[in-house]
Image (cartoon, helix red, strand yellow):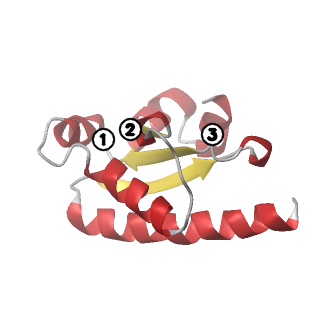
Amino acid sequence: MRKIDKKIENQLRNCLTDVCERALKEITGFMWLTHKVNYANFPQSLQIICVFDTSDNLQAYRGSEQSKSLESLIHTELMNTDIKVKNITKHVSFDTEQWCEAQHGGNWANRLTKQ
């Protein structure tokens, strides 16, 4: 990893940690988030995965007034760290602990490499 890539990774980690801490307090069923990126194609390759505990809680979130709050929060935090993405919805996806357990036996490393 190049020095500039490490700097970007640290910025991403810090801003997404802030998003995660806030979402844990504000969004029912939200558990954690992670990201994947190919630095040769950054920021277009940035993918942020938001994980909920159950599919029911994820569906409730998607059907609620706050259904775009995670994307909005992520976008704001990225912009505050000078990381610009054109359409945040293309960079954010959702998953659940429940689906990972059912489809990959709870093995997130395996699941994330297949996404």
Q: Which residue is disc 3 drawn over?
A: 44
Q: Which residue is disc 1 drawn over?
A: 54
The amino acid type of the residue labelled 3 equals Gln
Nearer to us in this view, 95 or 2: 2
Q: Residues within 10 Å of mark 1 (few under 14, many from 20)?
A: some
Residue at point 68%, 63% (across, down): 9
Tell me the distance, in whole angstroms, between the alpha carbons under discs 3 and 2. Answer: 29 Å
Does residue 78 lie above or below 107 as drawn?
below
Left or right: residue 13 versus residue 91 is right
Q: How many marks?
A: 3
The amino acid type of the residue labelled 2 equals Gln
Quadrant in which the N terminus is drawn: bottom right
Q: Which numbered disc, 2 or 1, marks the residue that appears first in the sequence?
A: 1
Q: Which numbered disc, 1 or 3, marks the residue that appears first in the sequence?
A: 3
Q: Which residue is disc 2 drawn over?
A: 98
x, y percent for residue 99: 42, 33
Q: Are marks 1 and 3 in contact (CB under 8 Å)?
A: no
Q: Residues within 10 Å of mark 2 (few under 14, many from 20)?
A: some
Q: Are marks 3 and 2 in contact (CB under 8 Å)?
A: no
Q: Quadrant of residue 11?
A: bottom right
The amino acid type of the residue labelled 1 equals Thr
Numbered disc in front, either 3 or 2: 3
Tell me the distance, in whole angstroms, between the alpha carbons under discs 1 and 3. Answer: 29 Å
Residue at point 55%, 72% (across, down): 14
x, y percent for residue 58: 27, 40
Quadrant in which the C terminus is drawn: top right
x, y percent for residue 54: 30, 41
